[in-house]
Image (cartoon, grey):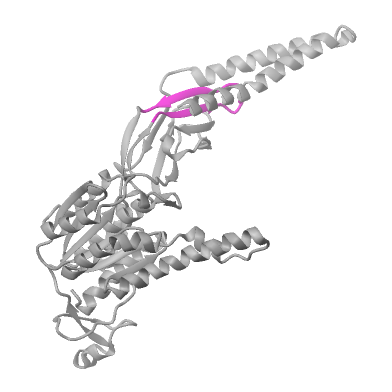
Amino acid sequence: MQNSLFSLFYRNLFLTGRLFGALACSALLFMTSFFLPWLNIVPYLIFFVTMALLLLDLALLYSGRNRLFAKRHMPERLSNGDENEISIYLESRYGLWLNLEIIDEIPQQFQKRDLVFRTKLKARGDTLINYTLRPTRRGEYTFNLLRVFVSSPLGLIQRRYSFGEPVSVAVYPSFLMMRKYELMAISNRLSEVGIKKIRRLGTSMEFEQLKNYTPGDDYRSINWKATARQGNLMVNTYSDEKAQNVYCIIDKSRNMKSAFEGLSLLDYAINTSLILSSVALLKEDKAGLITVSDTAGACIAADRRSGQLNRIMEALYKEKSRYLETNFELLYNITRKTLKQRSLVVFFGNFESMHSLERQLPFLKKIAKFHLLVVVFFENTELKKLSGEKAANVEEIYIKTIAEKLVYEKKLIAKELARHGIQTILTAPQNVTVNTINRYLQIKSSQKL
C-alpha cells in the first residue's frame, strides 16, 4: 500500500509538471519584459491560455460521476508455482479518448513495485488487460484496490479513480499442473510432458480394449485380425491391477526449506504429491497422505472415495516446514499403525550427507520390509552447476572440489539405498513430478506391488 501511495504522489507530480512548466515560462517572460517592453503581452497570453486549458481539462475529466468503470477478474484461488492469469476490465463513459495508467495493488508477497499498465481507451469504449502472477508460497494473499489515473488528450491534470475492496485469495498446491496431468492421463498422452511409455512385462493383466498402434507399444500385442479388418495396425491393451494403495509421505523438517526457482523443496514435494495422488486415483488406485517432522502431521488413509483428492489438497495447503529434524522412528510407527496392507510408499525427503542417511537407514529398511518404498530426494542444482564450471585460480579450484564432493555424496546415498533394496529417485527439483510419475507407472506396469 505504501508503495502504491508513493507511486500515486510521484505520478501526480510528474503530470502537473506540464502545467508548472507553462507557468514558469510565463513568469520568466514576465521578468524579461522589464528589459524588452514589447514582450509584456506574451506572459499574460501564456498564463490565460494555460488557465483556460486547465479549466477545460477539469471540465472534461470531472464533469459527472462514475464515468469510468474498472474491475479485476481472477480465480477464486491461485495455484502455487504456476502462472495464474489475472485480468482487468475497463469501460469508459467519457465522450473522448483517454490516456490511462492502471496500478493494481497486488499482494506484497510478489514483491512487484512497478506493476503499472498504460493504455488508451476510445470514447465510450472498453478494453481488457491480461497479466499473470506466479506465487511461490502457499497461504492467504491480499489484493488491495485498483487505482486508475485518467487524463484527457490535453494531459494537464489527472483524475484518480479507485475501484474494489481488499480481497483475500488462498494459494493452494499446484492444481493447474494437476489438471494438466489429469487430462494427459485420461487421454493416455502422458508422454507429451515427458512421461515415458513403459513396456509391459508379462501377460497376466486382463484385456481392456483395442486401440491404434503408436510408437512404443509392444509389437507382440498386435491384434492381426483386427488389423486386417481396420486396414491399420491395432493392438490389444490390458488393464493394470487396481485398488492398490499409494501413499505419499512428506518430510517437513528443515532439510526441506531450501529454495530453488522461488519454490521450497517442501512445495515441490507437496505439488508432486498432489499430482501423483490425482494420477493414482485416475488409475483406480487408492491415494493416501502422511506428513511428518519431529511430530506427526497429517494422516489420510488411502481411499478412492469421492472427495479424497480434495481432502488431500486441503491437508497439503496447511502444511509448513519445521526447524527440527524428522523423527524416523515416529514415521515407522505411523506406517505400521496406518498401512494395514502392502502399499507403494513414496517418501519425499532430502539427505545431504551419508552421515544423515546412516542415522535414518534402519527405519527406512524396516518400512521397506513391509512396503514397496521409493525415496525421492533432491539434487542441489546450484552445486551441480558449480562443479561443472572451469576453475581459474586456487580459490575456485577449492570451491569446485567441495562442490564435486557434495554432488558425488548424493550419488553415494542413492547407491546405498539401492543396495538395501530401496528404490530411489535423485532428481532436480523442477523434474521431480515427471520422474516420480514415471516411476509410479513403471511399478504399475512391472507388477512389483
Q: Nearer the viewer, residue 186 or 121?
A: 186
Q: Residue at x 42, y 62 (%)?
A: 379
Image-quadrant location for residue 277: bottom left
Q: Nearer the viewer, residue 449 or 360?
A: 360
Q: Is residue 302 left or right of residue 442?
A: left
Instruction: Check the image and report above or below for 254 versus 449.
Output: above
Quadrant occupied by the N terminus: top left
| Residue 398: x %, y % from top left | 59, 61
Q: Residue at x 43, y 34 (%)?
A: 108
Range drawn in magenta = 144-164
Q: Is residue 26 left or right of residue 160?
A: right
Instruction: Check the image and report above or below for 14 versus 291.
Output: above
Quadrant occupied by the C terminus: bottom left
| Residue 412: x %, y % from top left | 40, 70
Residue 189: tell me if it is visible. Answer: no
Image-quadrant location for residue 376: bottom left
Residue 139: tell me if it is visible. Answer: yes
| Residue 41: x %, y % from top left | 80, 9
Q: Is residue 240 located in the magenta-colored stretch of the structure?
A: no
Image-quadrant location for residue 181: bottom left
Q: Is residue 284 left or right of residue 193?
A: left
- View extreme (right): residue: 35
Instruction: Check the image and report above or below for 327 versus 56.
Output: below
